[in-house]
Image (cartoon, helix red, strand yellow):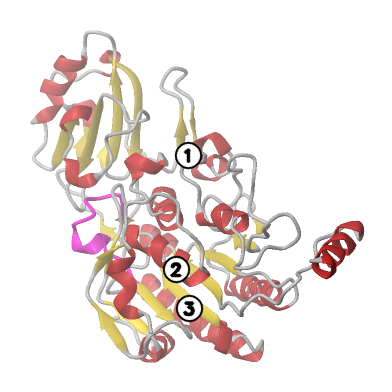
Amino acid sequence: MLLPLALLFAALSAGRCMPLQQAPSRSKLLLVSFDGFRWNYDQDVETPNLDAMAADGVKAKYMTPPFITLTSPCHFTLLTGRYLENHGVIHNMWFDTKTGVKLPYYTTQGISSWWDNGSLPIWITAQRQASEFMECLHSQGLKTGSIHFPGTKAKYQKEEVFKKLVEPALFNYSNEANWRQSIDTVMQWFTVDNLDFITLYFGEPDSAGHKFGPESPQRKNMIKQVDRTVGYLRQRIRESGLEPNLNLIITSDHGMETVVKTDEIHLRTFSNFSFKDIAFELLDYGPNGLLVPKEGKLEHVYSVLKNAHPKLNVFKKEEFPKRFHYANHSRITPLLMYSEPGYVIHGRYKVQFNKGEHGFDNEAMNMKTIFRAVGPAFKKGLVVEPFESVNVYALLCELLGITPEPHDGSLEVTKPMLR
């Protein structure tokens, strides 16, 4: 006992913890998201690098995101394994129903109270948990990093991602040179800073899908850029000597649907509906809407809107379909609505002009997205059946060797893809 105690005292007196025993080797993990990559975007464009990745690893036929199919909520499901009604990030926008204040996507990224709802993202869980051996008098967690991934900027129980880059305002999501610079930074973080887990986010092909439509030549060209980037990423992994010791997952948050420009849903034009009866509204955000009627007006507003348009679905909070796992949260308003695929909800004025949109029912095929994985933990040349993205979190925890927080998914869903 004297020798181990002496070694421990020496480590403590040196002012830092030194490992007393070499921990077993652990593969590193990189989670990459290409925003708005619909499940079949690789079927009308040549994608040799994505195809090669599938041949070398695992590909899902498609992956089903949670509802609502928006960027921040879906990414936070990947990070927590929770449905929206459990993790609380129910929208891209922070809002306060009492003051009427609504903040845009970029500003909301920095509102920690919007993200920190009791569901810890995997970054924080990994940082808190030890490797297999105790070091000094405490256990040392993993080192995590994140570049531009939704939720990166926030603090969780006063903790934050160990190493991070937050996208600046008015960021150019489509700049391929910036993409490669981000990949080079990831390689440096893995090799020089010895990080264990990194999340990397790209804002395309979402932007191209919104602006030009999911069937447009511009979107197809963007998929070619995505594929080149996957090729560059795997090349840099090999050049950095990481290939034998790095598991790579490439996925997305949701798909994209072509916007219908005829027979539009415009609340202002509905008979007997008046915004004078509304205390708070979150509208003009694709196919989703949240309403707080003024006191005594709920039944009237509900009855007016319920059958106002054949493509509009309106519900009281307590009657919203349970299959969405969405409405049972304190942030959900008394009335909520969503439109059928292709239709967006216009409020007071027509301010939405996108040719492509998401946010629709997650069972709609055009909302489905992709999942690819390659690395030492994954089988080779395997195509797996579709699964829900809520199950990705448990897989990430398994790959990192950490104990997951309470979650809504199951490791059993993704276990068949592991060696």
Q: Are marks 1 and 3 in contact (CB under 8 Å)?
A: no
Tell which of 154 and 183 is nearer to you.
Answer: 154
Residue 57 position in % (x across, y down)? 39, 86
Q: Residue at x 55, y 64 (%)?
A: 199
- Amino acid, disc 1: Gly
Mark 1 or mark 3, earlier in chain: 1
Measured in 3D between alpha carbons, the distance from the residue under mark 1 to the one under mark 2, in whole angstroms, is 21 Å
Would you call the spot at circle 1 few (<14 residues within 10 Å), some (14-19), or many (20 or more)?
A: few
Measured in 3D between alpha carbons, the distance from the residue under mark 1 to the one under mark 3, in whole angstroms, is 37 Å
Q: Quadrant of residue 171?
A: bottom right
Q: Quadrant of residue 373?
A: bottom left
Q: Secondary structure at mark 3?
A: helix
Q: Which residue is mark 2?
A: 398
Q: Residue at x 8, y 31 (%)?
A: 307
**Residue 269, above or below 71:** above
- Which mark is nearer the camera, 2 or 3? 2
Mark 2 or mark 3, earlier in chain: 3
Q: Which residue is mark 1?
A: 118
- Amino acid, disc 3: Gln
Q: Quadrant of the C terminus?
A: bottom left
Residue 174 position in % (x across, y down)? 53, 67
